[in-house]
Amino acid sequence: MSILYIVLGVLAIVIIWLIATYNGLITTKNRVDEALSDIDVQLKRRYDLIPNLVETVKGYMTHEQSTLIKLTEARASAMSVHDNKNATLAQREQAENALSSTLKSLFAVTENYPDLKASQNFLQLQDEISDTENKIQASRRFYNGNVRDFNTKIQIFPTNLIAGMLKFVKYDFFQAAEQERNNVQVKF
């Protein structure tokens, strides 16, 4: 009879461990999904701010219409990729990096327009977009931290056995765009 209790005890411990491992994997996976959703919230905020920025800038920048057109096209492209559920993380990153690059070029061009730089609407929108860009970066770091934790959890023994059986797969990290990895050239 005592052997039966030992076997039942070991079986109970194994079942409890399996349940705890599974619940831990689901919890960590849900954190990664939540972090990705946080990025989407910030991207939506940026998409909403850009038309206001374009309208504010349009009146001042009569000679820079191509910059505004590029910004509008980059926004439309990023939104299209963002709304495509089949888009990969790499495709989303590429579209978002193109939009960020276009925003940077717009702000660089505005340096030539003192009246625009003094406009309260423009300054407020510029601050909001800058704040949103910072929040996007923070959200991406938060996402990458959660991805690291999840990927580690599904790769270490003995959790990897359960994760493999239940078909948990690694998430990809957000990466810096190739042009952002290059050294900044400072010239005087």
Image (cartoon, grey):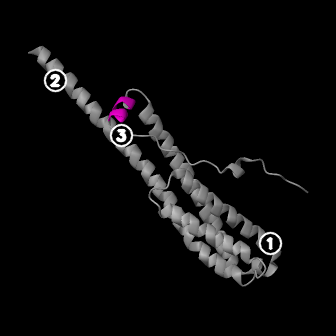
The answer to which of marks 3 and 2 sits earlier in the sequence is 2
Q: Quadrant of residue 17?
A: top left
x and y percentages locating residue 149 in the rendered image: 47, 40
The image shows residue 106, relative to residue 155, as above or below, that is below
Q: Helix, strand, or loop for circle 2? A: helix
Residue corresponding to mark 2: 8
View extreme (bottom): residue: 59
The dot on residue 111 is 1
- Separation (CA) of disc 3 from disc 2: 24 Å
Q: Which mark is residue 24?
A: 3
Residue flagged by tag 1: what amino acid is it?
A: Glu
Left or right: residue 173 compared with residue 112: left
The span from disc 1 to disc 3 (Cα, nearest Å) is: 51 Å
Circle 2: residue type: Leu
The magenta region covers 160-165
Q: Position of residue 136 (x, y in %)?
A: 57, 58
Q: In this picture, is 24 found above or below 39?
A: above
If you read the primary sequence from the N terminus, does the residue marked by circle 1 or circle 2 appear first?
2
Q: Foreground residue, 76 or 49?
A: 76
Residue at screen point 23% across, 31% down: 15
